[in-house]
Image (cartoon, rainbow, N blue to C red):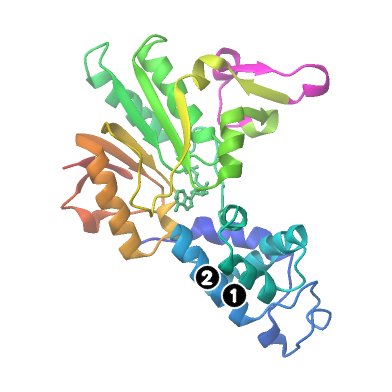
Amino acid sequence: MLRNSETDTATRAERGSALRGATESGATGPLAQGREFVWTDADFSRVQALIYQRAGINLHEGKHAMVYSRLSRRLRETGHTSFHDYLGWLETHDGTEWQEFVNALTTNLTAFFREQHHFEILASHLRAKPAGSPWRVWCSAASTGEEPYSIVMTALETLGANAPFKLVASDIDSRVLATAAQGVYRLEALKGLTPAHLQRFFLRGKGGNSGLVRVKPELVKLIEFISVNLIRDDWPFREPFDVVFCRNVMIYFDAPTQRRVLERIHRVLKPGGMLFVGHAENFSESRDLFTLRGKTVYERR
Ligand SMILES: C[S@@+](CC[C@H](N)C(=O)[O-])C[C@H]1O[C@@H](n2cnc3c(N)ncnc32)[C@H](O)[C@@H]1O
């Protein structure tokens, strides 16, 4: 089973930005709630159902303040004056707001070389095949790009610059995917990187761009950035992968959804391929599909 430390951390960070719900306070108007918009338990339940259908994200009751804070921005942007109206409008329209709704409710916490031991295991796995062997890797919840770039840096350091290495980096959130493809980061965000990484793989911004770094084109060109919803049965892959990273996203899914995603990952991984999962994710109940090979690293059966 999964711990929810990551989701709880995100919630704590946002808790200060909104007050308690209407039914708890007994108040009815937005001002009486100390809020800009009326926010009821029924609104929360509706959001819960919609994001579960669209993204598989299982929002538990502790997420009231987070959801209010993130979706209030959508109400302002779309000119709605209540959650009731906004959600009603969303449900009856098939437009771009659905993507914004999903983007608003995903949690995108990530970092370069997060869970460092995975990159050491990846490097030894890459060394295990004869030099020149092709590699296809999928980073399936790539967020703002720190994870896919860490994978590609590991591949270049291990296999050399001309190795036939390809990475597909995907996410459901279009906004973070655009940031990932852009490959521009603040210097402060590069804590997981060594000075050697910085020197070899990043260009420092000058003048108006000082304090920013850009990932070098030699990394970017190895990555294809695409939108993939893990819970939909329309993954666009024809060739199987040697390695899949699916880290810190399944914690947002319930057990049946996790199982369906694992079955699909099993189908797109080669036998003997590696699956890397997050620090709070444990899929030992799916031992018919994957064998545990190390701390949060599985081998496809
Ligand atoms: C907490 S981040 C983890 C990022 C990275 N994998 C890591 O471990 O650092 C979770 C990511 O999963 C994405 N996500 C959530 N639901 C998804 C879904 N149904 N399909 C694909 N990505 C999803 C979010 O947009 C977010 O960027």
In front here: 301 or 101?
A: 101
The picture places residue 117, in percent across and down from the top left corner, at: 39, 35
Report the residue at 82% width, 18% height from top.
Answer: 207
Q: Secondary structure at mark 1?
A: helix
Q: Secondary structure at mark 2?
A: helix
Residue 208 painted magenta: yes
The picture places residue 157, in percent across and down from the top left corner, at: 42, 16
Residue 275 location, quadrant:
top left
Badge 1 density bin: few <14, some 14–19, many ≥20, Cα 10 Å = many
Magenta range is 190-211
Residue 164 painted magenta: no
Identify the residue under disc 2: 48
Instruction: Please say whether residue 92 is visible from this viewpoint.
Output: yes
Residue 231 location, quadrant:
bottom left
Marks 1 and 2, how far apart in space?
6 Å
Badge 2 density bin: few <14, some 14–19, many ≥20, Cα 10 Å = many
Q: Do residues under tags 1 and 2 come within 8 Å of each other at their CB atoms? A: yes
Q: Amino acid at mark 2?
A: Gln
Identify the residue under disc 1: 44
Quadrant of the image containing the N terminus: bottom left
